[in-house]
Amino acid sequence: MAQVLKDDVQESIAAAALKVFARKGYESATMAEIARAAGVSTGNIYRYFANKDALFYAVVDDGFVRAFALLLRRRVKALDGVDDIRTLPPTAAYHLASEDLLRFCIENRLRVVILLGRAGGSRYERFADETAGRLVELAIEHFRALDPCLQVTEAMRFNLDQIYRSLVGTMVSTLARFDDEAAIREAVDGYARYHLAGLRSFFA
């Protein structure tokens, strides 16, 4: 007799997997822990997902990763030609792109935590480092457009790398710490003001 798979059970397993992967990371999480969190037997999980890899990439899939990367790049590129975001109206492209990215992060809170901070051992394990690197290059590109004579030294690149690694890490910590939208927005807004002010001073 063919096995009958139930959508609600599969959804329960996926929801439990998100929580366990976000808490423990891909490498440390086990199928047994996920099964307990989902309220099913470990054996039953394998009726729905062949192994931990299959489950992980079902809940953090390539489409999600591409969407996140696109929104992040769109937010940064919206700063092209802008010297001071404090002069921008609320309807400016930068503010709209920032809202789109933040809304995406709130709606996919645990997936973002996993992608940027708990993906070690998976094919996304370099994603956070690569994201920080891309942000460094985009920041340099932005400030060179404002000042074509800008000289970027090795020490400056090192500092920028530390700044953007900290930015990525803070986003992970914020989304892992808070599940309330208002608290997430308050934390992100406060850190963003600090980050952008510091970045302008760095390149001054």
Image (cartoon, grey):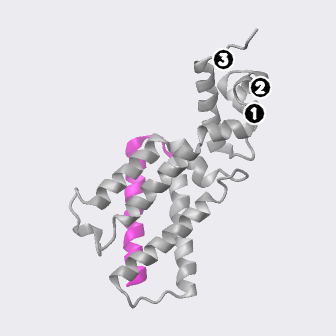
Q: Nearer the viewer, mark 1 or mark 3?
A: 3
**Residue beneath disc 1:** 31
Q: Nearer the viewer, mark 2 or mark 3?
A: 3
Image marks 2 and 1: residues in contact by CB distance under 8 Å: yes
Residue at (70, 37) in percent of width and height: 54
Report the side of 92 relative to 127 (left or right): left
Q: Quadrant of the N terminus?
A: top right
**Residue beneath disc 2:** 42
Q: Main secondary structure of the magenta part?
A: helix
Q: Quadrant of the C terminus?
A: bottom left
Residue at (52, 76) in percent of width and height: 160
Q: Secondary structure at mark 2?
A: helix
User: What residue occupies the far front of the structure in this picture?
Assistant: 2
Distance of label 1 from label 3 (alpha carbons): 18 Å
Q: Position of residue 133 (x, y in %)?
A: 56, 69
Q: Earlier in the sequence, mark 1 or mark 3?
A: 3
Q: Position of residue 159 (x, y in %)?
A: 54, 78
User: What residue occupies the far top of the structure in this picture?
Assistant: 1
Q: Is residue 164 above or below residue 114?
A: below
Q: Which residues are magenta?
A: 177-204
Q: Earlier in the sequence, mark 2 or mark 1?
A: 1
